[in-house]
Amino acid sequence: MFKRYWKWLVLIVASAVMLAACSGKQSSTDDKGEGSSEKIVLTAWAWNVNVGALNEAMQEFQKSNPNIELKVEDIGRLDVYDKLSTGLAAGGTGLPDIVLVEDDRIHGYVNAFPKGFVNLSEKGFDQYKDVFPTFKKDLTSVDGKFYAMPFDAGPTGMFYRTDLFEKAGIKAEDIETWDDFFAAAKK
């Protein structure tokens, strides 16, 4: 499962970097327009475990794209939202090329600042949309257009009452799949 996750993480970061590189924002260069040798430096805001994941995925991406660099700034979850809101209200001043936000905030930001985000569907993201579950696509698209790229599904916990399991003759260790869980719930 980790290898599958890693493959998608690299794909997501690569897509985000390529979309950001195509978004038209000015980037620093080492050799003033020499085509593919032009150095592209992008910035990203993230927090916590996402910083390490982005940096690791970027290292993999750079093996085939050495001219693209991603500088990830760890600025804390709540600070991301404060700085993003302030930057958007100021017309984009001081914003990074890429910013990680939680899915449930995307619609609010896009609706409040419709010109503040790149329509990723126009940049080719739709070719990747089928690899994501519907609930993630619904959270990252507005009016059928993608403004964010799903990054993860977030942790989920399941709690159950052991006394009810025991009363129904269910052993928790026998539940290994969702189908097992649903079958146990019917008892």
Image (cartoon, rainbow, N blue to C red):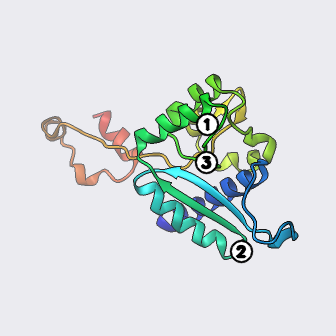
Looking at numbered disc 3 in the image, what kind of residue is underneath it?
Pro
Q: CA distance from mark 3 to mark 1?
A: 19 Å
What residue is at 73 percent from the left and 71 percent from the top? 67
Locate residue 25, reporting x and y percent.
75, 49
> Do residues under tags 2 and 1 come within 8 Å of each other at their CB atoms?
no
Q: Tag on residue 140? A: 1
Of 77 and 128, the residue lying toward us: 77
Is residue 134 placed above or below 100 in the rendered structure? above
Q: What residue does disc 2 label?
A: 64
Distance between mark 3 and mark 2 Cα atoms: 23 Å
| Disc 3: CA contacts within 10 A as few (<14), some (14-19) or many (>=20) | some
Q: Position of residue 75 (x, y in %)?
A: 44, 49
Q: Mark 1 belongs to which amino acid?
A: Thr
Viewer-nearest of labels 3 and 1? 3
Query: In the rendering, which numbered label is found on residue 96?
Result: 3
Q: Does residue 130 appear in the picture of this structure?
A: yes
Identified by mark 2, the residue type is Ser
Is residue 160 found left or right of 9 in the rendered image? left
Residue 102 appears anywhere in the view: no
Q: CA distance from mark 2 to mark 1?
A: 28 Å
